[in-house]
Amino acid sequence: MKLRTLFAALLFVPLCGLAADKEFTLVIKDHYFVPSEIRVPAGQKVKLIVENQDATPEEFESHELNREKIIAPKSKVSIFIGPLKAGKYPFFGEFNQATARGIVIAE
Amino acid sequence: MFGPAIIIFRETLEAALVLGIVAAATRGVDRRGLWLCLGVLAGLIGSAIIAGLTETIAQLADGSGQELFNAGVLGVAVLMLAWHHIWMASHGAELARDARHLGTAVKDGQRELSAIAILVALTVLREGAESVLFLHGIAMSGTSSLTDIIAGGALGLAGGAVIGMIMYLGLMRIPLRWFFSVTGALLVLLAAGLAGQMARFLIQADLIPALATPLWDTTALLPTKSLLGSILHVLVGYESAPSGMQILFYAGTLAIIISCSALVKRRQTGPLLKPTQA
């Protein structure tokens, strides 16, 4: 009984986000992000499409954006970010931190 | 060698801390060692399988499969912790009493231990799959020798294990009077933190709104990925830039587990307080 209540409470998750969001594409090549700087509109949710062209996996990570996601070799994923306040949000590839660095600029 | 070691250490840290806490929290329950080992083993096997399936999972749900998978894994882990805590609400006194006499372990804890084993397996799985992917990646890129990769991985793993062991030994020094209250509180906070992480993945997949992004930002003060930040992240669900929805999930999980445990406890002690009504 208690567990069922718990189940119900945890599954009670409002679904939304049907509106079309602006999309931005980011490519990982030779352990670099291209482009390394992305300008997105502030105050609205945007969709980042990250394509890993390398033969090794990468983890897109940003403390400021509060995001982390593994991208398998030769594959493409989407990551929703924002709505962001105007400002700079650095991100990096956790598996190749020396080279894979970039920044999202919300304006 | 040290690059891989640091990354593996970070991935291992969370699983090691969780293992340290649940190993202490299940003190006095019969055959806990066996169940914990089963959990770790299942998690390691699962890691290899999930790492191999990364691309397949990622392509599901329009590129958001990884988030849904992680959210599902975290959701089950939260349920297992909730169950454990509610079970402890009815058996805690018994455990505290029996733990004083060596060799008289609680016998009916097996079902409860299977929940703990599932929790351990899921925690190892989440962190393990990332480690496998990372190590496989650097092995394929050919920038490091195989010995360097293995040595780095082992060093990172050992570092994580040491922290987990310190956690366990530290907890075991707590006097029995407070012991199960402390481990119980730690596990409830762990559950709330995992629920917060689950919310983050659902937001990242655009299934729920973020509400406020972020509600606060203490990245400059204490980044989540620093050692202290990571430990607090596991222990109390600390995040340097959480969204409003994450805090809602966190607080909601705390409220549900605490109130359910209180209800169970009251039902148990109820008849004793009102003997004349029987």
Image (spheres, coloured by chain):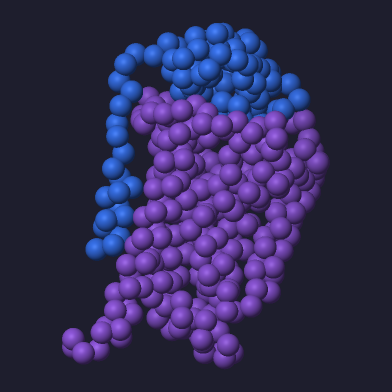
Q: Is residue B68 visible?
A: yes
Q: Is residue B30 visible?
A: no
Q: Against B80, is B212 above or below?
A: above
Residue B75 image offset from top left, x and y in percent: 40, 48
Residue A14 image offset from top left, x and y in percent: 29, 34
Q: Residue at x 78, y 48 (%)?
A: B151
Letter of the chain shown purple in the rendering: B
The quadrant in which residue A95 appears is top right
Q: Residue at x 43, y 66 (%)?
A: B84
* Residue B48 in the figure: left or right of residue B139: left
**Colour in which chain A is shown?**
blue
Residue B144 image offset from top left, x and y in percent: 78, 35
Q: Residue at x 66, y 25 (%)?
A: A92
Residue B47 image offset from top left, x and y in percent: 54, 48
Q: Residue at x 30, y 86 (%)?
A: B272
Pick the front one: B249 or B157: B249
Pick the front one: A44 or B217: B217
The quadrant in which residue B20 appears is bottom right
Count the labels in the image.
0
Pick the front one: B134 or B274: B274
**In which quadrant is the N terminus of chain B drawn?**
top right
Q: Against A101, is B127 above or below?
A: below
